[in-house]
Amino acid sequence: MQHRTAREIRHRNRFDVLRAVYAADGSVSRQDVATRTGLSFASVSNLIAELIEVGVLVELGHDTSSVGRPRARIAVNPDRGWLVGVDIAETAIHVDLFDLTMTPRRSVDVPVDPAATSPDDIADLVAGAVTELVGGDAVLGLGVSMPGPVAPEEGVSLFSPYWGWRDVPVKAMLAARLPHRIHLDNPLKASTVAELWFGAGREVGDLVVVTLRSGVGVGITVDGVLYRGVDNSAGEWGHMVLVPGGRVCRCGRRGCVEAYVGALGIAATLREIDPDSPLLGADGLATVAAIAAASASPTATAVVERTGQHLGIAVANLVNLVNPRMIVFGGQVATLLGESILDAARQSVADHALSEVSLRLSGIRHNPVSLGAATFALEGFLADRDTFGSVAALRTKTTT
Amino acid sequence: MQHRTAREIRHRNRFDVLRAVYAADGSVSRQDVATRTGLSFASVSNLIAELIEVGVLVELGHDTSSVGRPRARIAVNPDRGWLVGVDIAETAIHVDLFDLTMTPRRSVDVPVDPAATSPDDIADLVAGAVTELVGGDAVLGLGVSMPGPVAPEEGVSLFSPYWGWRDVPVKAMLAARLPHRIHLDNPLKASTVAELWFGAGREVGDLVVVTLRSGVGVGITVDGVLYRGVDNSAGEWGHMVLVPGGRVCRCGRRGCVEAYVGALGIAATLREIDPDSPLLGADGLATVAAIAAASASPTATAVVERTGQHLGIAVANLVNLVNPRMIVFGGQVATLLGESILDAARQSVADHALSEVSLRLSGIRHNPVSLGAATFALEGFLADRDTFGSVAALRTKTTT
């Protein structure tokens, strides 16, 4: 019951209206929004009036091209302020500045010095990059993705798989360095919320978003809402046991999904097939890139086939437990291998899954992690009492 | 978003109020219900007034034992009508008649003739048993549990693992034989809803209920509501792949969880340890019963240990994906082996699960499948417009 109180319903409806405007990729009429959301025209009009009042939406004039009464066109106001998305990864920190249409306008990449990865080092790097990128401009919110389990409410990184941090108050450390409102989560949750707002979530509410990078994991959505589990750690699919007693995973356990379908796992499969393969690169992702580039070769084909069989079983397992409508694949490994890895997985999914599911690559072209982190900041801005304080009078008239 | 409209919120709140009354195991004050549900005293008073109006609750007089204004005691009205729960299993059909306090009052078991298992045969058996049990008494609803995947809205058994049925309209076939309102679902969903209303769900909203019988599977609850997935097939944990290429499962696939922790799987483990063991019985459940009875013997200990290791990995996999607060174990296998199987699983759960979870045996003493089936009928009765038609005027004053 994430949406039980009148206030929560109002937030959810506000999100839905704004998602419908984003989905139009341009401008939209109130009637279009009502059709897409299933809300009444009166509710939509009230919610749009609020969003116009606070400057999130603008009215662009009337559409006179169709028959009947001219309909006002509504669009997101790009000039309302910036949202910042930060993707903290093992070797680099990527920061994007989005306008309110969620178009990335400025970006910066800052390499992480492997010898300077204390919490203070990383907080300094992030704060420096954000300050450089933002300048003096108005920021509506800052979203940060930190690998590993995270407690979003408390803003704490519970464990960092790369740097061994435990219980680091990342949000408080950044808040001491930056004036912005900060939202902390991890790459799985960020990619999933990006998919919900700007990807397959526009058509399907019950998704699983599989992220295949060095680490792997999933995000689950239920009826258009991110499912977190009781400790925000739902979706740790990467450390489900695929092969009992199998390969040692980076996490120290044996036989994890990640040890077979993450970048290092794929490199390990290549090494099993050909220990001296010229496709073996400096790290897992370089190896996956080489396999993708040599996709016609028998070795590359064999690696993709074998990886697809493992991926298919691991995907079937989540289909059997969660029963989603669709599974969307993103992350560098999915981007590099493309449809070939899905094709290789399909038979094994069909062999093991009890219900039907469609598999597709994510259509999000931008980094889904920084986009998703910025989307958390957008959701925070939209749910903030301060943002809508001036429209309290209007709000009481809103039908929910 | 199972609860987005005002009507859905009202149903949910009505369920919560009634669950709070059941949880009191006797009578309760309006203030107790407000405390337990988190609803306002005004909402609770309105919802209780509706439930008294339709005869579900009764006022028992005032409690003058405590300091302050005497509080009216509220209880479920046992005489309002019967709910029927039907557990269709491979070898027998079990039917319970519950009064509205959900106390079983009359029961009947009807053996299934292995030579007569057509849909019409089974529908005749169920209808005969229900008619015999009910007599001419008022029935508020009839819930039926049918093994295998089921489409509850359509009332169709999509596939029966025992009898090979496909797409059988069980609800319509029973409706042609019985005058009652019928609800169809499967044992996993029924056990879970029983646990939600009458078991651990009284304290914990985010549960996984593991059913270990001949077949095994789970039910997932999210914030006090059964999670079904898009086709009602979420929870097919029994056919997740535990050991790729492992034992052949009854479903024809290899390495399924059920092939290791279901009754037949446990018998197979015993046979691996001692092919001539005197503990091997006529069927899987008889063997599990013999193992339980010989629990001190080295062979039985070894079987329970090995089964616990498999169970622990399979449970850790669902913890990593779903991140529930608690896992509750029920079904004959859990009942027979008791705490010993949980003890055997705990280390393996701890080795593989990334987040904390508590494991416990179900405290439901009655058959959870027939109780859950009857609970679906109760939910249907409470959500029925006809039931509350006469209190429409009252309802408009209800605060949600």
Image (cartoon, coloured by chain):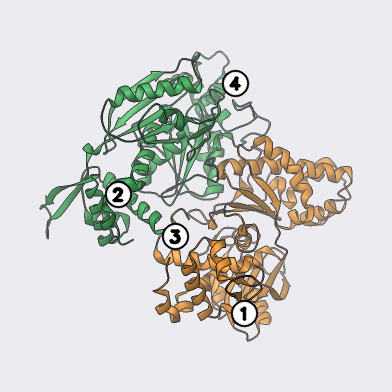
Chain colours: A green, B orange
> Disc 3 marks which residue?
B3
Q: Nearer the viewer, mark 4 or mark 1?
A: 1
> Which residue, given by chain and number where applicable, does mark 4 sit on?
A272
* Numbered tag placed on residue A388 in the rendering: 2
| Residue B168 in view | no
The residue mark sitting in front, 2 or 3, is 2
| Residue drawn 49% across the image and 71% down it | B383
Q: Position of residue A218 (x, y in %)?
A: 49, 38
Q: Quadrant of residue A316?
A: top right
Q: Say which of A363 and B49 sits in front.
A: B49
**From mark 1 to mark 2, how far is it between C-alphas?**
47 Å
> Which amino acid does the dot numbered 2 rest on?
Phe
Residue kind at label 4, given as amino acid type:
Glu
In the displayed structure image, the side of residue A176 where residue A69 appears, left or right: left
Amino acid tagged 3? His
Residue type at mark 1 is Leu
Classify mark 1: residues with Cα within 10 Å, few (<14), some (14-19) or many (20+): some
Chain that bears disc 1 = B
User: Could you say where residue B129 lies in the image, as x and y percent from the top left?
Assistant: 67, 77
